[in-house]
Image (cartoon, rainbow, N blue to C red):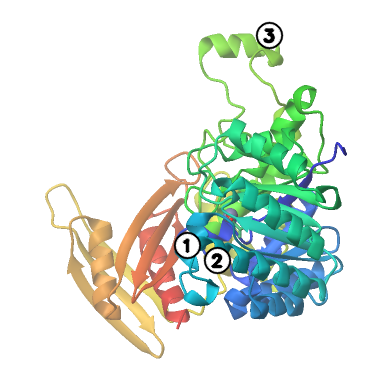
Amino acid sequence: MSDLVAVFDTTLRDGEQAAGTRLGSRDKLTVARQLARLNVDVIEAGYPASSPDDFEAVRQISREIQGPIVCALSRAVPSDIEACGAALDKAARPRIHTGIGASDIHIMGKFRDERYGRTLEEKRARILQLGVDAVKLAKRYTNDVQFYAEDAGRADTAYLFVMLEAVIDAGATVVNIPDTTGYAVPEQFGNLIRGIRENVPNIAKAVISVHCHDDLGLAVANALAGIRNGARQVEGTINGVGERAGNAAIEEVVMALRTRADYFGVRTNIDAREFHRTSRLVADSLGMAVPANKAVIGANAFSHSSGIHVDGFLKDRETYEIMRPEDVGFDESRVVLTARTGRHGLSDRLAKLGYELSKEELDQTYQRFLAVADKKQEVFDEDLIAILHDELHPVAETYQLEYMHVYSGTSAIPTATVRLRIGEETREGAAIGDGPVDAVYKSITAVTNTKVKLLRYDIRAVTSGTEAIGEVTVQLEMAGKRTVGRGASTDVIEASAKAYVDGLNKLAGAG
Ligand code: KIV
Ligand code: ZN
């Protein structure tokens, strides 16, 4: 058996299904370029039938990305598969990922209609046939067809084996075994993969892929158990982002395989030095911060603080470190960005962070960078990311915050006055609130006459020190639509107002 495990990245598809996140085609392309630098084997770029935007994202990524296979997802539905075929039309190495529910819970729960049969047995037979037909149709567009047996982690194994045999006969070159609900535990999941190898007669004609979710915090452990038992493709996302509790974190799987090569005896093609940069780009694009204690790429992953640890570490690094920070892209030497750094230094640092900016975008960002650098002694990478979000957001500005004044204090009722430009009109309003942010939000609501629910409000200082940039992320809901708004400023009330207005603009743009 080969010792190479292919890495299938689904950050742009399953990862983007994380609640409250949405990536436009431009953000997707930026992340895809970085995934290519990371040298993943497969980029799952999206689900073209889900929206015109996603179709466009898959199309653009297919056109530009040359190294990795570009994959698109579909249900076992002809129109989905045709959309994949069209979106992948120009891909150098296209793959269609199609599939259908394999567990009885999915079969009985999702395919209730009698046209799928009345009894479980009838429905199983019909579902299997739909899977086979889907693979055959996908084969008309590309030879590289991956089949997913959704909820395989809870499926009846005898039925799963028969289903896999049939789809491989129909031409599937990769069979994906998803633990869709994160229900499996490592030993059991490993046995499932071993069982597939031992009981599916034509399995040698296909690669087994594992796709694990993290509902019980076992996604990485399950994926590793699958590899240990013969899977030769592993699926996951950067930072473990994804539906519900997310997917197996690629950086954790890859570094476990690498650090414990003595145990697993396999390798990947990944350039692990790109992990840190990729992680930050994904966190930034999705608006989902990486916890400091996150394995491999968290800010504290290579920090030592207790006396005993520091003493041991300084004597011999290996006493408390099993990986080297530079192996996953942490940079120990830093270029300090200040107002004197210049455009070249700025664009160089932006490129290192994974952003390729046009000349106009760079000019725009540079002006904002200078304004921030004037207020701070040093501009950190996190500051730059916050600036980029603020300056280069491709959302139409239906609402523009022109002016804001807040009155607040220990014994004062927080009061805010805001002035917004709404199209050609300028409107002003004031409100009181429980705190200064509440007062600002109430005054913006009054001025814009919107009925928006604030679902979440997060604030973080993206750098340390009192002159740090505060980044605010809000999740808003209006008429059933949800969005995330972001704002950054050295003044946290202003950052809060900008985040709210940004969210309103996105909701207005969502039509
Ligand atoms: O979790 C899952 O089952 C999936 C499939 C669509 C592969 O994401
Ligand atoms: Zn999934």
Residue 503 image-quadrant placement: bottom left
User: Does residue 307 appear left or right of residue 357 in this picture?
Assistant: left
How packed mark 3 is, by other alpha carbons closer than 10 Å (few <14, some 14-19, many 20 or more), is few
Q: Mark 2 points at which residue?
A: 123
Residue 103: give x, y in percent of width and height: 55, 54
Q: Nearer the viewer, residue 37 or 13?
A: 13
Residue 317: give x, y in percent of width and height: 69, 16
Which structural element holds mark 1? helix
Residue 127 image-quadrant placement: bottom right
Q: In which quarter of the image is ligand 1?
A: bottom right
Q: Nearer the viewer, residue 482 or 298?
A: 482
In the image, residue 459 sits, relative to residue 117, either above or below, namely above
In the image, residue 194 sits, relative to residue 113, either above or below, namely above
Disc on res. 315: 3
Residue 254 image-quadrant placement: top right
Q: What residue type is labelled 1?
A: Met
Q: Quadrant of the C terminus?
A: bottom left
Disc on res. 311: none
